[in-house]
Amino acid sequence: MELLPFWRNFSTAQRTPRILILVSLTLIILGLIPLYHPFYRYPANLVVEHSSKITSPLSYGTTTTKYQKIIEQDDEDTCDVFIGEWVRNPDAPYYTNMTCWAIHEHQNCMKYGRPDTDFLKWRWKPKGCDLPIFNPYQFLDMMRNKSMAFIGDSVGRNQMQSLICLLSRVEYPIDISYDTDQNFRRWKYTTYNFTLAAYWSPFLVTVKESDPDGPSHTGLFNLYLDEPDPKWTTQIENEQFNYLIINSAHWYTRCSIYYEKNQIIGCHYCGLPNITDLSINYGYQKALKTTLKAINSFENFKGVTFVRTIAPSHFEGGEWNKGGNCVRQGPFRSNETTLDGISLEFYRTQVEEFKVAAKEGKKKGKRFRLLDMTQAMLLRPDGHPSKYGHWPNANVVLYNDCVHWCLPGPIDTWSDFLLHMLKLEGRRALEESLQLK
C-alpha cells in the first residue's frame, strides 16, 4: 500500500530561511515531547496470567530514539509502515483486565480463563523502518482541545475501548453521553479537553430489520444503500469533530434486501421470490461510497477522516455458526498466509472507495487517510477471544468469537499506527501553513 508523502521538498529559494527555522524548531519540539512528560517514570504494571500477578514497572527507554528515527526521515527514505512482521515484545501488555474498566465482557479473555499469554507479547515491525510503541502522554497532548469519533461496527468499538485502556495510564475519561443508549457514547478527558465519541452503525447506511430471524437465523435487514445513517450523520454534521475513524464490512455478510431510491433492487441471500440475488460486495461498495460521499458533503466538518480497513476474521474448521473456531496461539509470518475470499473483496473495495473520496475531498478541502490494518491483523489468528469471551455453556450468538479481539491483545497495536498517522498529519498541517505564508 502506497503511503502518503511525509514531506514535500522545499525548492523555492525565497522561502528557505523562514522555512528552515520553523521546520527545525518543530522537529526539536516533537522530539522533546516524550522527554517533557513523566512517561519514563510512569508505573504501568502488566498482567501475565489469568490471575492478577503483577510484574515490575515498564521501561520506555527506547521510545524516544525510535520516534526520532521516524521523524528524521524524508520523502526519499520513507517506508510503508503497514507492511511488516510481528516481532517479540517482552514489555507488553501495557494495561490489564484488572486495571481497565472499558473492556467489553466478550473481549475480556483473561477474565474468562484464556490459559495462554504469549499472544500478548508481540509488536508490529514495519519492513525498513520502525513503529514506536503508543505513548499515551504524547497522544493526549496532541489531542488537547480536540475530538475524535469512531463510527461503525463492534470491531470499531473494540478499537476505541483498546484506546481508552491504553490512555488509562494517564487519565480516565468521564461519561458525558447524552442518554443511556450504549450504542452512542461520549467520554471526555477533562485535563486535556479531549472528547471521544462512539456511534454504532454497522452498515453505515440506513437500516431496518424486517425479520429478526431470517433465512440464516441472524436477521433479515433492509439496507437503504443511498441513504447514510442519520444516527451518525446528524451528529457529525452538527458537531465539529477533528477526527473520524470509519469502519464497516462484517455485517454485510448477513442476509439483506438492498434498496435504492426506496425501491428494492436486489438482495443478498434473502430467499424471497422475484428478487435478484446480488453479491455481498455489491451492497457494501454502494454503502461505503454513500458514506464517504456524505462526509465530503458536510459543510461544517473540517477534520480528517480515517478509513480503517477490514481486520479479517480467522474461523477455521467451519463457518462462525457451524463450528468454526480460532485456536492458534501465535502469529503467522507474512509468507504463511494470504488474504482471500470476501475479506479480499472488502479490502479492495475499501481502498478503491477511499481513493475516490480522497480525490474528490481534496477539491473541497477535505482530508481522507487510509488506516490500513488488514495485513497486520491477517497475521494474528491468535488474538481473538474464541470461547474465552463468556462462561462455558453460555447462551451467546457468537460462541467462538474469531471476529473481535482480546483486550489486552493485538488490537492495541492499532493505536501505534494511529499515533504515527496523527504525527504525519501534524507535519502536513505545518507544511500547508508554511505554503500559505
Image: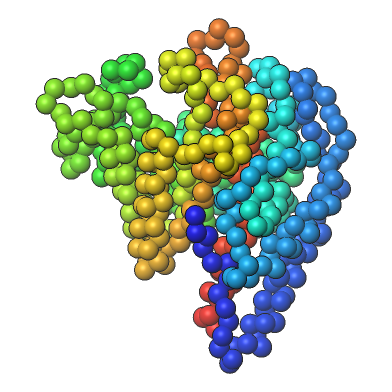
Q: Residue 128 falls in which quadrant of the image?
A: bottom right
Q: Which residue lies at the image location 20% right of the left edge and 30% below the top edge?
A: 277
Left or right position of 428 against 152: right
Q: Which residue lies at the image location 32% right of the left edge and 17% below the top edge?
A: 216
Q: Position of residue 10 (x, y in %)?
A: 58, 82
Q: Position of residue 257 (x, y in %)?
A: 24, 30
Q: Position of residue 113 (x, y in %)?
A: 68, 16
Left or right position of 298 against 339: left
Left or right position of 272 against 194: left
Quadrant where the C terminus is found in the figure: bottom right
Seen from the viewer's position, the closer of residues 154 and 329 is 329
Q: Is residue 185 above or below residue 137?
A: above
Q: Which residue lies at the image location 59% right of the left edge and 9% below the top edge?
A: 392
Q: Residue 92 falls in which quadrant of the image?
A: top right
Q: Position of residue 177 (x, y in %)?
A: 53, 38
Q: Is residue 83 above or below residue 383?
A: below
Seen from the viewer's position, the closer of residues 175 and 436 is 436
